[in-house]
Amino acid sequence: MFEKLKAEFIFNFIEGDRWKYIVNGLGVTLQVTFFALLLGTVIGVIVASIRSSYDQTKDDLRPGPWKVFLTLLNGLCKLYLTVIRGTPVVVQLLIGYFIIFVSSTNTVLVAVLVFGINSGAYITEIIRGGIMSVDHGQFEAGRSIGFSYLQTMQLIIIPQAFKNVLPSLANEFIALLKETAVCGYIGLMDLTKGGDVIRGRTFSAFMPLFAVALIYLLLVIIFSKLVGILERRLRRNEQ
Amino acid sequence: MKKIIAVALSMILALSLASVSLADSVVAATNCAFPPYEYYENGVEAGIDVDIVKAVCEKLGYDLTIVDTEFGSIIAGVATGKYDIGFGAITITEERAKSVHFTTSYATGIQSIIVKEDSTITGVDDLKADGIKIGVQQDTTGDIYATDDFGEDHIARFNKGADAVMALSTGKVNAVIIDNSPAETFVAQNAGLKILPTAYAEEAYGFEISYEKEEFYNAFNTALEELIKDGTVQAIIDKYIKAE
């Protein structure tokens, strides 16, 4: 049994340097996930600020150009959320590759943009939920001791909101990492596709698929551990 | 209410058991995006391979079900016994024959190079230049040969041949290496593309069956050889590929 496994392992990964497909694929997966995450977070923070600013101030704003502008911006953000959350990421990836970024020959960049824009929609809602979850009294308290809207957000609401959203944010990051497995559709050699290519060369399903699964699992475990440490740190000042 | 559910469940169970025990039904796997060998015509599978496999199964009295899967999963699926037959203009290679039992070859093909009409690429040697990207369908012989010849950095792998051709049309890759017959179909359907006159490689196609299913293999291969001999296979090929 052990001998057979060893032979399988050598055939699938050592022969013809096939382990390189896994290592290079892992590099691409991490690259796409990391930059998509950055882009998604930036989009998420911006869109969430627009959405929650609108929701919280629309009744107090005086009619005028600023109100019209904010309403328009809010409508645009809502459209973005509806479209991105309403369509599968694989379809978005193909649309991005074959239609929107048609002139780009940098496939990694296309994947980063598509996954970043996709993830941004989910991160938006997570952050907005976090802002909403902070009691409105906190906001009023901030304003009544003389902070401006931005100061209140920055010093009182956001720090509390961040603690609230961390678990769901980590969840989204994990989901994003695994979602990038569909990169193969646009010919990008990510981790999953690397395993696929080995499977196509050796015609054995077991080793490459389990190796790929194991690597994803390890990545998620390491990441969850890191988030756990961060959460504990953030909770320390609560006591 | 509970009784009805119980009865319904047991009926479903009985039905599913019954469908498994049908001995003379076979499952064939292919990647149905490779005209004229296999593709969808009005929503049903059609093409040279499809018709030949159908003809053989009809001759043997088997009930055929076709599964559309990724090209790279066909051979692995046949080897593990998930599918009874694998087909899809699959070239007979020594490497593949280690995993599955190939039938007698029923057709030959050549690997062609497709480029844009205004391309400066005129032959195989031009593909070796730095920065040239070659689109291939993953796990096909075009992919395997090109990876060996030009190296990993030159290859962009797609799940479907058509996706590779689309990437060529939009300028994401500089050339596509694919079997000649689908290449001709793709070039006919997409303006601005041409096939280079020099072929990249020549090869023979076979169907594959698991080594574990010896009896089925013998019956299938004998029937296939008979159909090749009486001209049925050639008639099917001629139907799809007009003689030059």
Image (cartoon, coloured by chain):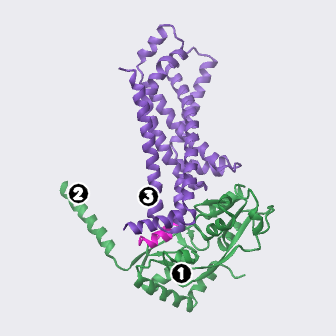
* Colour of the chain lettered B: green
Q: Residues within 10 Å of mark 2 (few under 14, many from 20)?
A: few
Q: Which chain is purple?
A: A
Q: Report which residue position mark 3 lands on.
A: A210
Write the start and end of the magenta stretch as one range.
Answer: B65-82
Q: Position of residue B216 (x, y in %)?
A: 42, 83
Q: Name the residue furthest left.
A: B3
The chain letter for the residue carrying disc 3 is A
**Identity of the amino acid at label 2?**
Ile
Q: Name the residue furthest top.
A: A145
Contact between marks 1 and 3 (CB within 8 A): the answer is no
Q: Is residue B28 above or below residue A42?
A: below
**Identity of the amino acid at label 1?**
Ile
Q: Is residue B125 magenta?
A: no
Q: Is residue A142 above or below residue A219?
A: above
* Secondary structure beneath label 1: helix
Residue in the image at 47% along x and 17% along y: A156
Q: Report which residue position mark 1 lands on.
A: B52
Q: Nearer the viewer, mark 1 or mark 3?
A: 3
Q: Quadrant of residue A197?
A: bottom right
Per the model, the C-alpha gap separating discs 1 and 2 is 44 Å
Q: Are marks 1 and 2 on the same chain?
A: yes
Give whichever of B110, B127 is nearer the camera: B127
The chain letter for the residue carrying disc 2 is B
